């Protein structure tokens, strides 16, 4: 972001402001970034675009409040994300630790479909279409946070796809979540079917 700001004739700290608007506040329009000068916002509008995934529908479980979201990607493909409520929702009202009560976990997808053929997973039936970019992974967090208005405390890379087969994008997304959205690294989980030491290939 600092490099982008400098390329447009601004000082590096403007890039940090831009980063805060995009990731900290989830703003999707350059013109809404009120502490950036109007000329800079206009130059940003010409030089860059804010790509986003589009909410299509959601389904809420009547049992525990788990919400499944369907998103459309810019190329028309679709992915799912799942927002999982605190452990108390699954305990039948039983007393749980206070930190458990505050936990709100988002399960994000890392690929469209999946190249593995795990018999226990419905995603396997659709085959593999492509890897998600780091931005498309992070935008699942931004969109769900915007839709629900709730603070997401935990992230699990366990939606559609095998995360370690899209390693570079997953690691970049994890970095953005910790530096831009304040999700502690210890509150992230990468769930894998057993693939190891694989770098992503597009």
Image: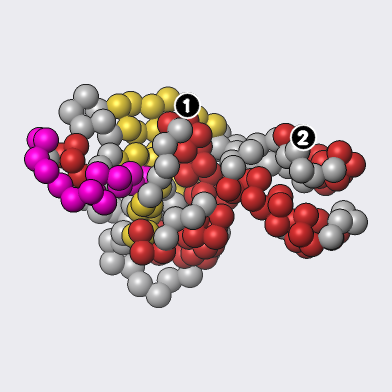
* Count of numbered tags: 2
Q: Secondary structure at mark 1?
A: strand
The answer to whether residue 95 is seen in the rendering is yes
Query: Which of the image's four quarters has the C terminus?
Result: bottom right
Q: Position of residue 197 (x, y in %)?
A: 40, 75
On residue 56, which mark appears?
1
Comparing 37 with 72, the one in front is 37
Query: Crowdedness of circle 1 by 10 Å Cα count: few (<14), some, many (20+)?
Result: few
Task: Please tell me which residue is depicted at 18% across the width and 40% down the height of the picture.
Answer: 88
Q: Nearer the viewer, residue 53 or 37?
A: 37
Mark linked to residue 31? 2
Residue 103 is inside the magenta segment: yes
Does the magenta segment cover residue 95? yes
Left or right for 143, reference 15: left
Mark 1–mark 2 contact, CB under 8 Å? no
- Stretch in magenta: 92-107
Who's the residue at 42% across and 60% down the image?
A: 184
Q: Residue 98: x, y in percent?
A: 23, 48
């Amino acid at each position: 972001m600092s490099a982008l700001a400098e390329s447009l004739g601004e000082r590096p700290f403007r890039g940090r402001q831009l980063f805060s608007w995009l990731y900290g506040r989830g703003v999707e329009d350059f013109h809404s970034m009120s502490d950036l000068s109007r000329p800079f916002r206009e130059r940003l509008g010409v030089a860059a675009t804010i790509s986003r995934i589009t909410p299509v529908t959601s389904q809420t479980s009547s049992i525990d409040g788990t919400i499944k979201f369907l998103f459309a990607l810019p190329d028309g493909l679709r992915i799912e994300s799942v927002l999982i409520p605190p452990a108390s929702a699954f305990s039948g009202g039983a007393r749980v630790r206070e930190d458990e009560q505050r936990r709100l976990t988002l399960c994000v997808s890392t690929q469209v479909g999946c190249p593995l053929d795990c018999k226990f997973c419905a995603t396997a039936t659709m085959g593999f279409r492509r890897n998600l970019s780091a931005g498309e992974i992070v935008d699942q967090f931004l969109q769900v946070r915007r839709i629900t208005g709730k603070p997401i405390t935990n992230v699990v890379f366990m939606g559609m796809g095998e995360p370690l087969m899209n390693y570079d994008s997953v690691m970049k997304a994890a970095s953005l979540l910790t530096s831009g959205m304040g999700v502690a690294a210890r509150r992230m989980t990468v769930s894998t079917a057993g693939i190891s030491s694989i770098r992503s290939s597009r």
